[in-house]
Image (tube, coloured by chain):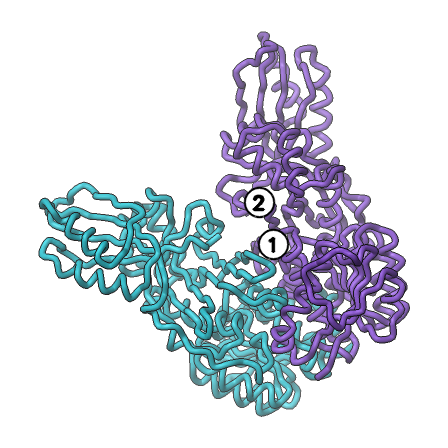
Chain colours: A cyan, B purple
């Protein structure tokens, strides 16, 4: 029986999960493929820790170099994470003729355009299903399942930490700071949570999705990015009263010869599928010109779901092994030579509906002043609510607007902030009616 | 550039959609594959009708035999539907060395076990993504995306007609008969709707999903099947009041050396993802031992979504063309030789929670009699509601039970029906708490 020999870089949470599948599901994998996937070696700096697995027959080493250069390894699974040394090890593995599978969205988002041509030139595959949406096979769906479609939009809840925090804030009426502390205690958020809560992780995943959807280069640095740290329990409640739930979404759409990419807290209808995606679940809505709306939901992180996606990539590569990869769909869904350098649309040109929260002095004429500025900018209101005054004699005004350009809204907001009666930071959220 | 030459059997709704994609998305397909997919010929008995497409360069014939035997065709797309002559044409195409892609669930459910070995022996592929879930790439997800998992369960809303009817009955409080008539007028239901509304279509799709999930042979005849024609608007309302929505689900689970397969109206929690899947949308929830719950939602039928799935299969086959299919995952997700003949579990052994609706005479002691029978069978109640009497002096009693075996429930019900005070047909629905 043909054997694909796998070397593993990193025996942390996900690496342990991958090793577990390759060891425990060996027979299932063979029944599916008619071939064998063998875990030959694994590298980790901490080999002393008990991982509850029987590593008999697996070479355990503490230097990743021993794996990426080994003669008896056909495919390297990179689960170190981060930019370096992950990038160097992946390059070295490719140079030594090994296929690569990774769960590293940072690596793909930042260095994908260096790695894909290198792999293609060598007839090698790079799999990264686990980098977006955890266990959900959403990249495969986009790359292969919807391959007949010109993609019209991608919307995704792509970060489990943020979704956990927003769900908890809604369910318990708790503050962002308190929920973040609890998430950190439970291991759902890092000690330095900024990568997750400021939307950077979501932006990396969105950049990958957008490039796959539209046949463009990955442009992570171009993604407009806001996180969830400014959301209050009151905002969540106000949105709910108006029929919406707040989710941190990654959004990508094509606009002629430009691509729109943005990450920000977004109001979605309470009756949408997306609104039901709670806790650490992820979801991706992909709309194509033929298939219409499709949606993919599942665990966005965790040892076992992420390992499921990693091993799916390994099995894909094994399907045609050892005959090279001419038979596989290209990693980014388009052959390298046809992937275009498409410009990112300026955020000022994005057309959105808006949720605006102002704290104003409780005095006559404030609403008239605010709404006349909006009218000057031809921004029309869908709803306006004035909340009861708080202890400081300020009043919250919540407005929902119809569609306008971001640049126009920002111009209006800077005038509104200039009003003497507007007391505190203005919060602007965006609303997406097209989310199903 | 390598060319894959396609012949199309049937230019009805879906066939026209497939031709449309192959003609209109030609450049997109080439950018993705680095190869060309060429529509060489199409067969239909009615060639006179204008399909709004430019068929320049496409050979239009009225005899499918001209396609399945043609020397200049590599892949045949079968969109005739039904058992015969579709089966004969598919066999003939395989015998003439052509790959086959079909949207025909009836054909795969009934004759798959004849067709797959034939194709495998010839090194040919059979694609049938469009046969289940319309445009949703759910078979690819199950076969490849979740390949590392032992599948724990499959739940699906697999028939758009039934889902449209149930959604409409709930939204309008309308009767089954009236909504069916409207669905027929809109083209959502056939003149003879029994195939859809009696659950047969769902059972065919479930049989395919179950065989793919568990590596077993397709056993369509073994699927326990109930349709939606006994559901009343009152049942939908009663379920809603208790926190549930009624959906026609296909359900498959492994039980040791047996497989459970059943299709019936099912109560799912109003807060579940599945409950939000409305109108003609389909959804499949697949749970694996590593990935946990995943869910796939999209259009279950229609020209464009179904054509999207058909062409995805064509493109998959084109990926490795002309090098044969050794590189593709096997059609049923397991190599032919490893697919087992697994016994179907008897419906009497299924463990369910139940919704029971009785119409009883409004007289003392009825509830005591009914509940004491249930107690005899060790069936415990989660909820019991007595509805106001109707004009005929009958009273509706709605009960939700905890889990018990189907056989035990049927024994209890036959005793309850024997009670003098129980007036009319008893409706038994099942409830699934594991639906996410």
Residue A36 spot, x, y in % from top left: 72, 74
Which chain is indicated by disc 2? Answer: B
Q: Nearer the viewer, residue A70 or B125?
A: B125
Q: Is residue A176 left or right of residue A341?
A: left
- Circle 1 sits on which residue? B287
Q: Is residue B152 left or right of residue B7?
A: left
Q: Residue at x 32, y 63 (%)?
A: A405
Secondary structure type for disc 2: loop
Residue B413 spot, x, y in % from top left: 70, 23
Q: Are marks 2 and 1 in contact (CB under 8 Å)?
A: yes
Disc marking residue B373: none
Mark 1, other Cα within 10 Å: few <14 / some 14–19 / many ≥20: many
Q: Quadrant of residue B323?
A: bottom right
Q: Mark 1 or mark 2, which is nearer the start of the sequence? A: 1
Disc marking residue B434: 2
Asked if marks 2 and 1 fall on the same chain, the answer is yes
Q: Looking at the rendering, in which quadrant would you find the N terminus of chain B?
A: bottom right
Tally the marks. Answer: 2
A434 w.r.t. A197: above or below? above
Mark 2, other Cα within 10 Å: few <14 / some 14–19 / many ≥20: few
Q: CA distance from mark 2 to mark 1?
A: 10 Å
Q: Residue at x 61, y 19 (%)?
A: B371
Q: Is residue B27 left or right of residue B84?
A: left
Q: Quadrant of residue B148?
A: bottom right
> Can residue B358 be seen in this snapshot?
yes
Secondary structure type for disc 1: strand
């Amino acid at each position: 029986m043909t054997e694909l020999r796998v070397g593993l870089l990193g025996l942390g949470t996900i690496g342990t999960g991958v090793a577990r599948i390759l060891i425990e599901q060996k027979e299932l994998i063979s029944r599916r493929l008619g071939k064998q996937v063998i875990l030959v070696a694994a590298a980790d700096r901490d080999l002393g820790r008990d991982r509850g697995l029987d590593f008999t027959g697996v070479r355990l080493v503490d230097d990743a170099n021993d794996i990426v250069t080994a003669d008896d390894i056909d495919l390297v699974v990179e689960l170190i994470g981060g930019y370096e040394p992950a990038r160097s090890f992946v390059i070295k593995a490719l140079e030594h003729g090994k296929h690569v599978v990774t769960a590293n969205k940072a690596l793909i988002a930042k260095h994908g355009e260096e790695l894909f041509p290198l792999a293609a030139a060598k007839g090698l595959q790079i799999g990264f299903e686990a980098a977006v949406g955890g266990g959900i096979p959403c990249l495969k769906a986009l790359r292969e399942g919807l391959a007949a479609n010109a993609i019209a939009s991608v919307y995704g809840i792509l970060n489990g930490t943020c979704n956990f925090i927003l769900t908890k804030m809604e369910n318990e009426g708790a503050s962002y700071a308190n929920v973040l502390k609890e998430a950190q205690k439970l291991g759902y958020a890092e000690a330095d949570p900024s990568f997750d809560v400021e939307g950077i992780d979501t932006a990396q995943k969105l950049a990958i999705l957008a490039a796959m959807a539209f046949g463009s280069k990955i442009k992570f640095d171009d993604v407009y990015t806001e996180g969830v740290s400014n959301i209050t329990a009151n905002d969540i409640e106000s949105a709910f009263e108006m029929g919406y739930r707040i989710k941190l979404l990654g959004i990508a759409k094509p606009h002629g010869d430009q691509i729109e990419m943005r990450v920000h807290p977004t109001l979605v209808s309470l009756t949408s599928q997306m609104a039901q995606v709670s806790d650490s679940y992820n979801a991706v809505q992909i709309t194509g010109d033929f298939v219409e709306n499709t949606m993919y939901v599942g665990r966005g992180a965790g040892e076992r779901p992420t390992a499921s996606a990693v091993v799916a990539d390994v099995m894909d590569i094994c399907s045609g092994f050892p005959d090279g990869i001419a038979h596989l769909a290209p990693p980014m869904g388009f052959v390298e030579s046809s992937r275009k350098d498409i410009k990112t649309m300026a955020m000022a040109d994005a057309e959105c509906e808006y949720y605006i929260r102002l704290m104003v002095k409780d005095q006559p004429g404030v609403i008239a002043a605010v709404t006349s500025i909006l009218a000057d900018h031809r921004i029309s209101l869908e709803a306006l609510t004035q909340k009861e005054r708080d202890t400081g004699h300020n009043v919250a005004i919540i407005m929902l607007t119809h569609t306008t350009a971001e640049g126009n809204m920002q111009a209006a907001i800077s005038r509104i902030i200039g009003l003497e009666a507007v007391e505190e930071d203005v919060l602007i959220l965006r609303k997406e009616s097209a989310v199903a």
